[in-house]
Amino acid sequence: MTAGSRGDVAPFTGLGHGLARAGHEVTLVTHERFGPLAEAAGIGFRPLPVDPRAELESTAGRGLHRSGTGAGKLVRVVALARAVAGELAAGLQAAAEDSDVLLLSVSVAPLGLAIAEGLKLPSLGVYLQPHAVTGEFAPPMIGTRSLGRPGNRLAARAVNAAVDAIFTDAVHELRAGLGLPRAGTRAARRSREAMDWPVLHGFSERIVPRPADWRPGLQVAGYWWPYDSPTAGLPAELSAFLGAGPPPVFVGLGSATTPDPEQVGATVVRALRAAGLRGVIQSGWAGLRADGDDMLTIGEVPHRDLFPRTAAVVHACGAGTTAAGLRAGVPAVPVPVQFDQSFWAARLTALGVAPGAVPLRRLTAPALTAALRKATGDETYRVRARALAALLAREDGIGPVLEAVEARAGG
């Protein structure tokens, strides 16, 4: 069960496909627009209401761009999510009634846990980002540098309280409908932490080592790569473009939106041309476009097939695209927009596969040109990226989840 953008959904198609291959009947429960992803992966699907793209393009969604800080954006997104949380609850409950065990992403965990309690179902968390309290880094959602160990822990508790506030009313309604005693989301969080409720994280310890101060039950499993059909391949136009010259640079903001896509697109094109590079521009939810013989605008394509054929990837650093770039073994130029993207950008820089971030709010052609020249001109970035990709290829992120599911479900 998950909710959010494509990056909050796609990794679970790979996880679900792997669990299905091991003999489990798997259903992905998420927004209706992502139904084709589940179908392609050969797993079941149950739709949830709410279109995440429509919410981001609404007046409230576009208001996120008026906040210049991570904390300010978090306040706005809490209000936005709180307005739709109740709409998700009925769909989650209906899907759970046909299930034996619930796997909950962080975006629906408070609702899913209330449902699991009411229906007496085992559950576990499957998170794509590290959300638990730790002193080792600041909470990824606010996108700041370390605040020191005490400050990091305090900030993480504040973020958790803000997230709990999203679901307060919806959880109260759910619990009442399920015949459960009234309990707040904060109390529920304390309860599951006291019971060491299991959460598996879909990233590699090579990218984010497990914090030493995490409670028991929190495990870093490894990446869950999105399912891509072995025969899917790339569109003919894209294949022809790739073969018509040196490897291009991929540029895409994924599910992030921007208040002025034309300006962002023009800035990207100027920077690519100043660096002497060809570009493949993914339109995405931002609606980016680029024209010219040295540029190609594309829609959704498998990152698995495209990224290894690029000179570098310029992206917003959502968890999913960050993972795809690491898997491909190519340098990155992070252009974080909001929330956890600055966290992943900092990790790429620390790992030596990116020269540093160029945040969207400070994006200029000269700044992006300089970063592109470093990423593509200094071979050390590509060497490190390839070495890291080789290590990630040996990991099995699905195995630990399979073990946890079978243990939770009683074998």
Image (tube, helix red, strand yellow):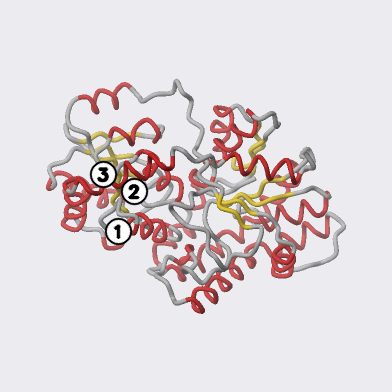
State how many labels appear.
Answer: 3
Q: Nearer the viewer, residue 60 or 140?
A: 140
Which residue occupies 30% across, 42% down? Answer: 330
Which residue occupies 59% across, 48% down? Answer: 3
What residue occupies the far bottom of the structure in this picture? Answer: 150
Where 59 falls versus 183 (above or below)?
above
Identify the residue under disc 3.
Answer: 382
Q: Is residue 278 left or right of residue 186?
A: left
Identify the residue under disc 1.
Answer: 357
Q: Nearer the viewer, residue 17 or 212?
A: 212
Q: Is residue 226 left or right of residue 375?
A: right
Badge 3: residue crowd in 10 Å (few <14, some 14–19, many ≥20): many
Question: Distance between the Cα atoms at labels 3 and 2?
Answer: 16 Å
Q: Secondary structure at mark 2?
A: strand
Q: Nearer the viewer, residue 76 or 98?
A: 98
Q: Amino acid at mark 1?
A: Ala
Where 355 falls versus 310 (above or below)?
below
Identify the residue under disc 2.
Answer: 315
Percent x, y of residue 194:
73, 66
Which residue occupies 38% across, 44% down? Answer: 326
Q: Amino acid at mark 2?
A: His
Percent x, y of residue 156:
54, 70
3 or 1: mark nearer the eye: 3
Question: Distance between the Cα atoms at labels 2 and 1?
Answer: 10 Å
Q: Is residue 93 left or right of residue 329?
A: right
Name which of mark 2 and mark 1 comes first in the sequence.
2
Name which of mark 3 and mark 2 comes first in the sequence.
2
Name which of mark 3 and mark 1 comes first in the sequence.
1
Q: Secondary structure at mark 1?
A: loop
Which residue occupies 83% across, 60% down? Answer: 176
Q: Please identify the quarter of the rendering in which residue 24 is found.
A: top right
